[in-house]
Amino acid sequence: MTDIANMQAETIAAAQDLAGLDEAALYVLIGTQEKAIERNPVLAFDARLAPGYETAHQGLVTELKTLGERIVNKWSRALFDLVCGAEPNDPARTQLLSAVGLSEAAAIAAVTALIMPLVSPPIAAAVSVVIVKKFLIPAGGEVCLYWGEQLGPAEG
């Protein structure tokens, strides 16, 4: 396998390992990852990045959670636009909708693969789990409609 394929496989495995966390814990993790990557950019390549919480460098947990929510909203909107845009036969849409119909693990793998070119592996892993749990699984067969309703209008 190529380095990119290895990184993608590792990131998908990391995302699936995060599936047991609740939404709030994932938001804090994403905020913590973002702060750690800001301090040490090489950490962006560690798909399993789980930095410890450091008050002095990262601020309050509520601030980390808010940061994580903003990051999820940003990438969820970008992925929604890609998957649910104007082209109904888009391969990304077909891939994602097929995966959602299979299982949570398949949906997490598909979202992770779609979002990896846009964001670092550790953020992609955690964000993909939130997107699947919050937007895709609850939507059933109406993924784009439900997802769009949950996101609300795009901010200009």
Image (spheres, rainbow, N blue to C red):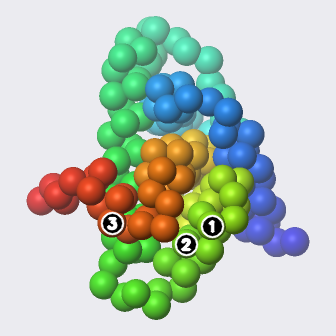
Residue drawn at (12%, 59%) of the image: 156
Q: Nearer the viewer, residue 49 or 106?
A: 106
The tag on residue 55 is: none
Name the image quarter holding the N terminus: bottom right
Q: Taking the image as drawn, is residue 108 in sight?
A: yes
Mark sitting earlier along the chain (2/3): 2
Q: Taking the image as drawn, is residue 36 in sight?
A: no
- Total labels: the figure holds 3
Mark sitting earlier along the chain (3/1): 1
Amino acid carrying label 1: it is Gly
Compared to residue 82, the image places residue 135 above or below, namely above
Q: Are marks 1 and 2 in contact (CB under 8 Å)?
A: yes
Compared to residue 14, the image places residue 34 above or below, namely above
Residue drawn at (55%, 81%) of the image: 94
The tag on residue 97 is: 2
Residue drawn at (66%, 53%) of the image: 104
Q: CA distance from mark 3 to mark 1?
A: 16 Å
Q: Position of residue 17 (x, y in %)?
A: 74, 40
Q: Position of residue 114 (x, y in %)?
A: 56, 67
Q: Are marks 2 and 3 in contact (CB under 8 Å)?
A: no
Secondary structure found at label 3: helix
Q: CA distance from mark 2 to mark 3?
A: 12 Å
The tag on residue 101 is: 1
Badge 3, how many Cα within 10 Å: few under 14, some, many 20+?
A: few
Residue drawn at (38%, 43%) of the image: 71
Compared to residue 58, the image places residue 152 above or below, namely below
